Image (cartoon, helix red, strand yellow):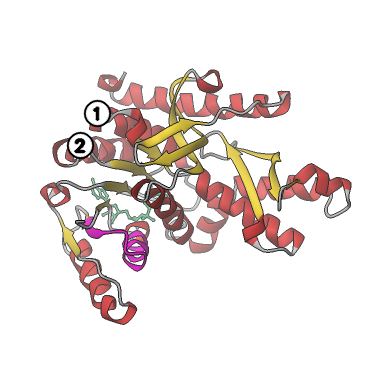
């Protein structure tokens, strides 16, 4: 069987890390695309030269022409400008919207059958714009946010309880913004919901509330440390988990920004919800019951995503 082809649009910090992980996991042959001349070529060659040491079999090439992504099975998009200190994800909107238009056109022309994962921020609005410009069916294009947000939540919880991250599951809903909705009752340690862990004295509600707040601001915490860019290791690992579920038809249940058409009472908007990712892309949207507090937080988060999408439409009325 021929190897799968993975196209990475954007060969920056996340793009390079994606290429590294995809090669180490032998997910397929890799094309790194970027508008910056030399960057994708240099990173692809450097990574290819690590192949004999790691012992992976994957071809890695860099390109500045969209024709190089032809026939890709998976496309992961990180093209754009990352957040700088003091800049909100929303500040990125105008710049990255234009980038999504160009990238969507490239995907439509050369990789219309691919499963597309968007990472570029502000995520929920960018994936919405990318679906419009690439003209892909909604089940073939998702945004990466929830896997990252829930990984951050899991990490903080594992530290709090001094248990393995493997035994912590976390559930995060809503947009990839500071008002995302980490759910306590759907997050567990080895199946024990977090509120029960408060009851048995493992932690307190106040400590959990602080962890939720830290999760919400997890992206900003990294930006404040790095100063010249945003997180890239965990975002890349998150998108690779999604790509792997598609390529290997794993049907993992992963929180992703998916296009809702009535689910959770939301129409025509990309919002973070649990979905099943298999060979057909988004095979199912998991609709759980929300309690009144979760519903209120979810609605607030959806309202900010809607605000960003309206801002996109105002910038480019053709998207309306
Ligand atoms: N087409 C292709 N590549 C582009 C374009 C474009 N129109 N515009 C910019 N790029 C490239 C840049 O040349 C750069 O190499 O996108 C790359 C972005 O890489 P970084 O600046 O290193 O950003 P990174 O940390 O990888 O984050 C990318 O993901 O998490 C989000 O907020 C983050 O939106 C940002 C994106």
Which residue corresponds to the image point at 40% horizontal and 41% vertical from the top-left? 278
Rendering coords of residue 223 (x, y %): 50, 56
Can residue 254 be seen from the camera position used here?
yes
Q: CA distance from mark 1 to mark 2?
A: 8 Å
Of residues 216 and 258, which is closer to you in this image? 258
Q: Mark 2 — residue?
A: 112
In the image, taking residue 277 as reference, residue 112 lies left or right, namely: left
Q: Quadrant of the N terminus?
A: bottom left
Q: Mark 1 — residue?
A: 135
Is 45 situated above or below 156?
below
- Residue 22 covered by magenta stretch: yes
Q: How many residues crowd mark 1 within 10 Å: few (<14), some (14–19), many (20+)? A: some
Which residue corresponds to the image point at 23% horizontal and 60% vertical from the top-left? 29
- Which quarter of the picture shows residue 301? top right
- Under tag 1, what secondary structure? loop
Of residues 315 and 176, which is closer to you in this image? 176
> Which stretch appears magenta?
16-32
- Residue 61 covered by magenta stretch: no
């Amino acid at each position: 069987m021929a190897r799968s082809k993975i196209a990475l649009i954007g060969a920056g910090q996340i793009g390079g890390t994606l290429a590294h992980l995809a090669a180490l996991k032998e997910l397929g042959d890799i094309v790194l695309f970027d508008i910056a001349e030399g960057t994708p070529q240099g990173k692809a060659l450097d990574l290819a030269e690590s192949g004999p040491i790691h012992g992976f079999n994957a071809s890695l090439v860099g390109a500045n022409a969209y024709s190089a992504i032809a026939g890709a099975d998976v496309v992961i998009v990180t093209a754009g400008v990352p957040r700088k200190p003091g800049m909100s994800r929303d500040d990125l909107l105008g710049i990255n919207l234009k980038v999504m238009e160009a990238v969507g056109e490239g995907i439509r022309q050369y990789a219309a059958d691919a499963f597309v994962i968007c990472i570029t921020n502000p995520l929920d609005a960018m994936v919405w714009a990318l679906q419009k410009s690439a003209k892909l069916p909604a089940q073939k294009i998702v945004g990466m946010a929830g896997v990252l947000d829930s990984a951050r939540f899991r990490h903080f919880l594992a530290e709090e309880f001094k248990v393995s991250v493997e035994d912590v599951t976390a559930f995060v809903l809503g947009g990839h913004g500071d008002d995302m909705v980490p759910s306590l009752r759907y997050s567990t340690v080895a199946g024990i919901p977090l509120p029960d862990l408060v009851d048995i004295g493992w932690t307190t509600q106040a400590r959990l509330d602080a962890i939720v707040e830290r999760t919400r601001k997890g992206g900003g915490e990294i930006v404040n440390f790095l100063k010249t860019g945003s997180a890239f290791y965990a975002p890349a690992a998150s998108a690779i988990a999604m790509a792997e579920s598609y390529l290997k038809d794993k049907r993992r249940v992963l929180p992703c920004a998916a296009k809702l058409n009535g689910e959770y009472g939301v129409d025509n908007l990309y919002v973070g919800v649990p979905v099943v990712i298999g060979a057909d892309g988004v095979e199912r949207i998991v609709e759980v019951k929300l309690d009144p507090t979760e519903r209120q937080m979810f609605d607030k988060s959806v309202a900010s995503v809607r605000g960003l999408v309206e801002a996109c439409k105002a910038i480019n009325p053709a998207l309306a």
